[in-house]
Amino acid sequence: MTVNRPSTALLTDRYEFTMVDAALRSGQADRRSVFEIFTRSLPPQRGFGVVAGTERAVQAIADFRFGDAELDWLRDIDAVSPPTLNYLANYSFTGDVWGFREGDLYLSESPVFTVEASFADAVVLETVLLSIFNHDSAVASAVARMVDAAAGRPVIDGGARRAHERAAVSAARAAYLAGATSTSNLEAGRRYGIPTVGTIGHAFVLAHSDERTAFESQHDLLGPNTTYLVDTYDIEVGIRTAVSVAGSTLGAIRIDSGNLADESKRARAVLDQLGANETSIIVSGDLDEWTIAELADSPVDGYLVGTNLITGSGHPTASMVYKLVAIEDDGGALQPVNKRSSGKATIGGRKVAFRCGEGGDQFRDLIVTENDTAIGDVAGPGRRLQVPLVRSGQPLPSPSLDNIKAWNAECLMALPASGRALDGLEPPTRIVDRS
């Protein structure tokens, strides 16, 4: 029940409430409006983005409500007028929401999330929705590329320590749906059912009198089928010590430093010499899709990704925006509106998106602008990208995280090689204005 969940109403910017306050005064607050979330352009060398955060966004809308604590604080700081406080006290989203299926791919101008409601009801959602989509989609887009570069080898999320403690949980979810096999974050495992992994860090080795003693302690607890961190001192010595403690059936070693291509080859040679032919080699240390691709010919069996899953060069922003594209006129009909400012112009009119040519070189998006035709009734070629998410304020059932993960994998397979390349070319988007 949402009543037991914390409110999302103050996860926003003050100007959202200022606009509601002014709109109530000017008479615009009740006008039926359409807002869309999209990105004007993908980051350089990106042929696609991955939609992530949809389920969290729908839940955030359901939890957007004002209790006494929120209202009292807004009153104390004189954020809005008394009539607007009364409006907020009774706020409950009653509009409709359409959006891409979570895990689907998005291109420039794709209407990832469409909110249709009164102006006041919709405008206050801007910040919290963008916070979710910009964060989760950026993580998922980066991880999808890492997973593709890994070519079937597992990618593990270990980015929690590089993020805000709550954002790390959401990042783990986004990473998992985009192909990561597991996470180091226990809260993400508890909340979302993601498999969790983890053994020891360098501090554990340093806390013991020597490496052998540390490995013996680890072996006593976990047995041979565990991962030994072998680069605290000397990698080759660490490998030999791990094998002498755990035997030739030890599960894996992890290397976190040095030239990973060279170190993994030397490690494989030492392991094979010692008869540990089935022992896996896991590498970590500021990996991104580029460094993972460089390791394609190395004897690496898995990647623990941290910094560049959360931030850094592997995690450019999704740059999504939330814009008003249509508003009701005095006769009750939706009319397109758009910004014309240089560099930030928008395309007016509610949009319906179709994906054409999946699985081939003709892969592209067709976006049709429509105003008062129901989104579900707009005809077009290819696969309709938006699905209903909220009807009359009520969230619709959502797929499981594992189903979202499977859907993402299916969508990626339908993308042409030119879009999946590390210097990917974005498939074209065609916009047809029928408004």
Image: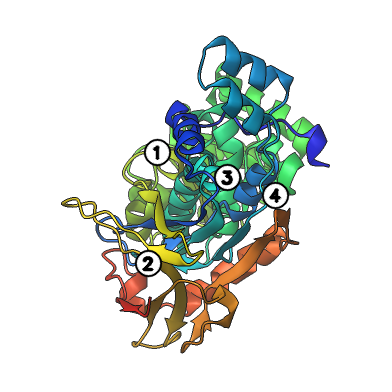
Give the structural element (helix, strand or loop) at label 4. loop
Residue kind at label 3, given as amino acid type: Asp
The mark nearer the N terminus, 1 or 2, is 2
| Front label number (1 vs 2) | 2
Report which residue position mark 3 lands on.
Answer: 121
Please rate how many residues cluster around mark 1, counting C-alpha atoms within 10 Å: few if below 14, some from 14 to 19, many from 20.
Answer: some
Rendered image quadrant of residue 22: top left
User: Residue beneath label 4, please?
Assistant: 194
Disc 4 vs disc 2: which is toward the camera?
A: 2
Residue shown at 55%/74% (left/top)? Answer: 375
**Residue occupied by mark 1:** 311
Find residue 32 and report its horizontal and vertical position in percent.
Answer: 53, 56
> Would you name the residue on which mark 2 appears?
107
Under mark 4, the amino acid is: Ile
Residue type highlighted by circle 2: Leu
Disc 3 element: helix
